[in-house]
Amino acid sequence: MGFRYEFRLSGSGGQGLILAGKILAEAAAIYDGKNATQSQSYGPEARGGSSRSEVIVSDEEIDYPKAVNIDLLLCFTQEACDKYHQDVKEMGILLVDESYVTKIPKGKYKVYSVPITETAETKVGKALVANIVAIGIITQVTGVISKEAVEAAILSRVPKGTEDLNLKAFNTGIEMAQQFK
Amino acid sequence: MREDDARLMTGNEACAEAALVAGMRFFAGYPITPSSEIAECLARRLPQEGGTFIQMEDELASMAAIIGASLTGVKSMTATSGPGFSLMQENIGYASMAEVPCVIVNVQRGGPSTGLPTLPSQSDVMQARWGTHGDHPVIVVAPSTVRETYDWTIKAFNFAERFRVPVVVLLDEIVAHVNEKIIVPTRGEFEVIDRDRTTQDPKDYLPYALTDSDIPPFADFGSGYRYNVTGLSHDETGFPANDPKKVDLLHRRLNRKIERYRNEIVHYKTELLEDADIVVVAYGSTARSAYRAVRNARALGLKVGIFKMFVLWPFPYQELDKLARRVEKFIVPEMNLGQIAHEVTCAAKHEVAQVNRIDGGLITPDEILEAIKNVSV
Amino acid sequence: MFPYEKYLRRNKFPHIWCTGCGCGIVLKALLRAIEKSKIAKDDIALVSGIGCSSRTPGYVDFNTLHTTHGRAIAFATGLKLAKKELNVIVVTGDGDATAIGGNHFIHAARRNLDMTVVIYNNYIYGMTGGQASPTTPAGKKGSTAPYGNIEPAFDVSALAIAAGASFVARSTCYHAVQLDKYIHKGLLKKGFSVIEAMTPCPTYYARPNRLGNVVDMMHWYKENSIPVEIARKVSEQEKKEKITIGILHDAERPEYCEEYQKLSARIMKTDNK
């Protein structure tokens, strides 16, 4: 069987996780020439409520589009972390925003606990772009999708006039991840 | 670095774009999760293409409006989900009876009633076939991927035009909402069929003429052919008829239209069946799980193949019957309590194993693999 | 002699309407209005739902569409939007238009979609055997209101005006000439036009309610109709149980097809930039 990489971005509605998933999928599928799917499960709320966005990247056609054996789990809420951490595979990655996730469940995965939202607010200038900071970290730590592809996908998906802000967020994320040991 | 025709698209977007490519220029609908993106996309796109989009007051009206539009010769479509599909049944029957080509997209969600608005289901399979009262012709297609949704939306219009019937595109929340890479086909890669139009003198025109093909040539409303259209049983002239002979002739022809052309309509693909002693029959998004399960099972040395349906109605009874003569064990995974499994049982003439989920979750490859292991012992 | 023959599908006669039914009177008024409007037969689509009045399309030589119960206006909406040059006329009854089709009726009025709707109001479901409808006056009997109707009735014209129709008129089968005048005005009006035609149902409304024969009903229309100009001056008490006839509403409002065409032109222009 070919290469298959599973991301799950979890948190609550309004945190931009669906958009983040679409950017990762578009980067992999359109700009990196791989196959990718992005799916989501959502409740009836437009804001609040739990939100889950999943991206599968593969070098072959993707049949089952849901994540079952997660390579990277991003958690923007404690609730999401408690609920999904056991789906992360052995030696997978658990990435959490330390402002929201204070209790990190034990498991056989690598853990990166970083101030994502706080960095977005203080360094980039807007908490709203925390999702893009997270994308930067994910790009750097996984190496599954090229930096150029993610950049191109960000530019194609974010609202006009916010390109610079979002690229700054993305690069900030990359720099943060470069400090990881 | 960018692949030129590659796009990341959801099934709902692919459905809307493909409909435009098929020549659809009239859409009437009513918002409902998880189908609303189709309406949203067409609200933006149709005015750009010189077509018409209208948000109606309900699904009854949406279905009626697309029939009215199609009578003028314009390819028409609506999109909805279970509760709205229930309301549309009345005029789906009208379209069958009056032989008005149209396409109805039903993005299935959990039911009955308001059910599970945001979660997938495949429980409208029987409703798509038998939802409206009376014996009636209808064609139902059920794609599994975004690319298939694109292709089968075009084919749905082709069927509707070719056979003058309503065609249902049964999506489910997974196919509708998954963002997937598709290489948008070029115009030369698919066929677009338009309904056969009469060339007769208006004074000789019979709107429901008995022809060799069983499909009467169409005349656009307002093009000089003044004829009558009714939902009542009618004769060749299009006027109501009670004469048992005429009524019998009409209804047998309406249903024969599908039966005699079933080989043009029925469509499925098989994989790994040559040496298989187990076959998984699947459709819609569940087929995606089935593919993975079958590959995983093969890796374990289990002789299992797949029969994936693109068209649910007319149902491939003959094909499954033939298959059942050499393969004994059938497994049908579906997000309902066995609607297609029952038909497979009829075709195979023995009980089949089922994998069913009705909790709003997509059946996983492991759940199907478990069923494969169970029947293989 | 008016050339009715020109518009009739004579081989479809005799019609199914009862002796004394008002449907024929409204039909003739409609044909006179069409003749006066000089609209070609090919350019007219006559759409109906289910009921006595809704059988009209079968008898007339236009593009005719006999649809499902209550849905005539919704089918007509699709026809009109897909082929804007068609003159769309809907013939419908009180039950068809205001009960099962009430939602379509008010929304088409709200959109002010260019079509002419002739509502035959006979206070009853005739086709199915005299059941009470939303316009059956309180106290009157129907087969489903054997002890007298306890529901208040819809004022169909008031409903149309409130919902946004740009032209609304009412008349009766006794005032047949006035009917064709209003239908003619409706045909010429750009927008949603409603002509409420009060029609006698001697079989299922007059008989159970002991209102006499059709001649008596015509007399009743004559005695109880008040021209709108007078109705506006008299007290509510004086108008009680009377029928206000005349042009009740005539206003200019943006019409849906035109608005859509404007939008489409604007979008296509922006896209070409």
Image (cartoon, coloured by chain):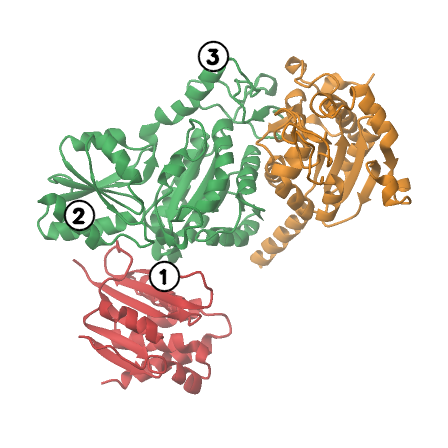
Chain colours: A red, B green, C orange
For the residues labelled 2 and 3, the Cα–Cα distance comes to: 51 Å
Question: Which chain is indicated by disc 1?
Answer: A
Q: Are marks 2 and 1 in contact (CB under 8 Å)?
A: no
Q: Give the quadrant of the N terminus of chain C.
A: top right
User: Which quadrant: the C terminus of chain C?
Assistant: bottom right
Q: Which mark is residue A40?
A: 1
Q: Is residue A171 left or right of residue C235?
A: left
Q: Residues within 10 Å of mark 3 (few under 14, many from 20)?
A: few
Q: Name the side, left or right, on which B268 lies relative to C47.
A: left
Residue drawn where x is 10% and y is 44% of the image: B376
Query: Marks 1 and 3: in contact by CB < 8 Å?
Result: no
Q: Please identify the quarter of the rendering in which residue C43 is found.
A: top right
Viewer-side label of 2, 3: 2
Disc 2 residue type (three-letter)? Ala
Residue flagged by tag 1: what amino acid is it? Gln
Viewer-nearest residue: B80 or B356? B356
Q: Position of residue B280 (x, y in %)?
A: 20, 43
Q: Are marks 2 and 3 on the same chain?
A: yes
Mark 2 chain: B
Percent position of residue A115, x then y: 35, 84
Residue B354: x and y, percent? 22, 43
Disc 2 versus disc 1: distance between alpha carbons? 27 Å
What residue did someone put label 3 on? Answer: B245
What whole-number distance in Å separates the C-alpha atoms at marks 3 and 1? 55 Å
Point out the tag, 2 or 3, that comes first from the N-terminus. Answer: 3
Residue corresponding to mark 2: B371
